[in-house]
Image: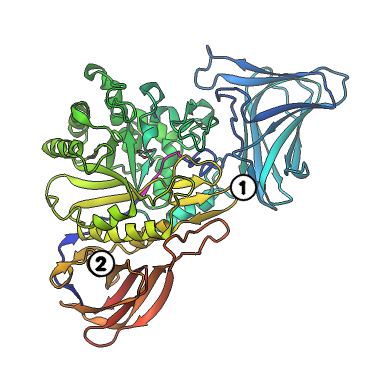
Amino acid sequence: TFMIRTGEPVATVSKTMYGVFFEDINMGADGGIYAELVKNRSFEFFKPLMGWKVAQEPYREGAVLVLNRREQNTANPRFIRVTLPAGKPGSLSLTNEGFRGMGIKKDLHYDFSFMYASRAPGIRLRVALRDPKGQIIGSATVTPQATNGAWKKQEIRFTATETEEKAQLQISFEGSGGIDLDMISLFPGDTWKGRKGGMRADMVQMLADMKPGFIRFPGGCIVEGFDLSQRYQWKKTIGPIEERQLLINRWNFEFAHRPAPDYFQTFGLGFFEYFQLAEDIGAEPLPILNCGMACQFNSAELVPLDQLDPYIQDALDLIEFANGPVTSTWGKLRAGMGHPEPFHLKMMGVGNENWGPQYLERLQLFQKAIRAKYPGFKIIASSGTDPDGPRFELLNNGLRALNTDFIDEHYYRPPQWFFGNTKRYDPYPRTGTKVFAGEYASHPAGVAPEKKNNWLAALSVAAFLTGVERNAAVVEMASYAPLFAHTEGWQWTPDLIWVNNLKIFGTPDYYVQKLYARNKGTKVVPLTMNNEVVAGQDSLYASAVLDEPAGEIIIKMVNALAQEQSVRLQLDGKKKPAGSAKQIRLQSDDLNGINSIEAPQAIAPQETEIRLSGKRPRVTLAPYSFTVLRIRYS
Ligand code: AHR
């Protein structure tokens, strides 16, 4: 019997409890949620024509040159110069391969745009989407006007005639003359909220469906960079996109099983867009900034303490960018980008997976400056990568002594760790510094790509989260990581949501996260079996919350046995349960079961209405199942 003391709430569930962690890893941003289809649109990758092929068919005299105007334009120095002499037959073409191809949808319109400066008018651009067999599946022709050497933007819209996962974009130059080109771009017409230059709607929708309490961005290790020169700098990610300086992605060349030499951050998805995304999906924005330390190697690169000011200033300016009045320097910039209202930023992380006394020294300086200017603003401190080790213990004590608002714990561990750690937060102090479980995932045995989000991994997280929920007085935020992965461009597994160029699916872990986030309730109430919390006895795990506005008790139960188990529910308190309840069940008999592009819903929640009879109604927990029960009360 599960005894649920509905009249004795022990903690309030934070509104931000279950959120999402976004990082541009696994083609999460470029080639992923950022809907740009052209790779290396501004020719700034290591090799200027990476992703592009130049062809002259039949042989056509003329040239495509890459020019570099570094002295005039440090953010976007390169462009191409196309020259076609008069009176010659044939055409010269440039073909872009996209991000592992381009996903094109029949009958959807596409916006092709480019920046250009005409040097000698007379060149026409014939734009064609081609399938892998070379068939044209959408095309347009555009004749740029003379610009007298000035840069202008031109755009043309056309409709695709077929659906194709691996199309390419060919631009054929015809006629004669000279033209300079930059920012060659193609966006689908079905972006999220129809925003031009926006995000892939199916990916944003998956996030919105979760109703996440917060969105943490932009990472992860990309915050730190391989070294400090390659750290993420938010100020370089706002304003006109042609002025956002591209940066090598921290996950470029990482992890030999999927090297990604073409992985760069173009920042079309920059900090303004992250704030907007947070607002769109009703999540609190949670940016993480570099603290003056490079990635995971404490001794590798550090900013001397007396030179940390620009880093701290970045943090202060970010708060002004998000919240400041339109008359302030940074607030004005935000307004200029189309958002005069504040974004209501309330918290910020300082550092990602940094540790040691060097970290504490740096954090302290950030904290002092931020609290002096913005009292009440919440600061989230990193806690390294080893949540069980002595290093963690030391840091934890140091952070608590500093009275930091949150400690960001990260754990990527095997399923057994998650089943065995449901009491992890029971001994944590209820007062003072809170916990942000900022990155976690259950990693089943094996090596990628076999190491997948199987049902065992998801079930172990479902069990673990009963312990997190029970400890809502300690843990106020939690997010699974990483969030997105492209089936042909990942560096890290498992991941919550997978995409190819056209399709998307949520893993069993996604559904666990979604069920917790959408059923988080408002108050935790005690749930016990024989006077003990249910944390693995008979392979059962359980927790309970009240959802006060809905007038419901929500019980989450995990049965990690291969056999069905039945439990009785005894609701002891002022709440009188109605005779029926909504049951949402996630279940598979196969612990190795997965979802995939071909079978996206193989493991997905099933909702039914069940009868509850008697004073201690009996409920049946299926083998290897996670059940959420919503019981109405009066
Ligand atoms: O989530 C993948 C990586 O794991 C993150 O970038 C980093 O913070 C952690 O080590």
Mark 2 Cα shell of 10 Å, populated few (<14), some (14-19), many (≥20): many
Frontmost residue, 123 versus 565: 565
- Which amino acid, by three-letter code, is at mark 1? Gly
Would you say residue 298 sits in the magenta stretch?
no
Mark 1 Cα shell of 10 Å, populated few (<14), some (14-19), many (≥20): many
Lateral position of residue 322 relative to residue 96, left or right: left
Q: Magenta residues: mostly which secondary structure?
A: loop
Identify the element where label 2 is drawn: strand
Q: Residue at x 27, y 50 (%)?
A: 477
- Whether residue 68 is visible, yes or no, is yes
388 relative to 268, above or below: below
Q: How is the image coloured?
A: rainbow
Alpha-carbon span between mark 2 and mark 1: 45 Å
Residue identifier under label 1: 189
Identify the element where label 1 is drawn: loop
Give the magenta part as a residue range: 20-25
- Whether residue 193 is visible, yes or no, is no
> Can you tell which quarter of the image residue 233 is in?
top left
Mark 1, ligand 1, within 8 Å: the answer is: no
Frontmost residue, 41 versus 567: 567
Residue identifier under label 2: 542
> Can you tell which quarter of the image residue 22 is in?
top left
Q: Position of residue 139 (x, y in %)?
A: 75, 41
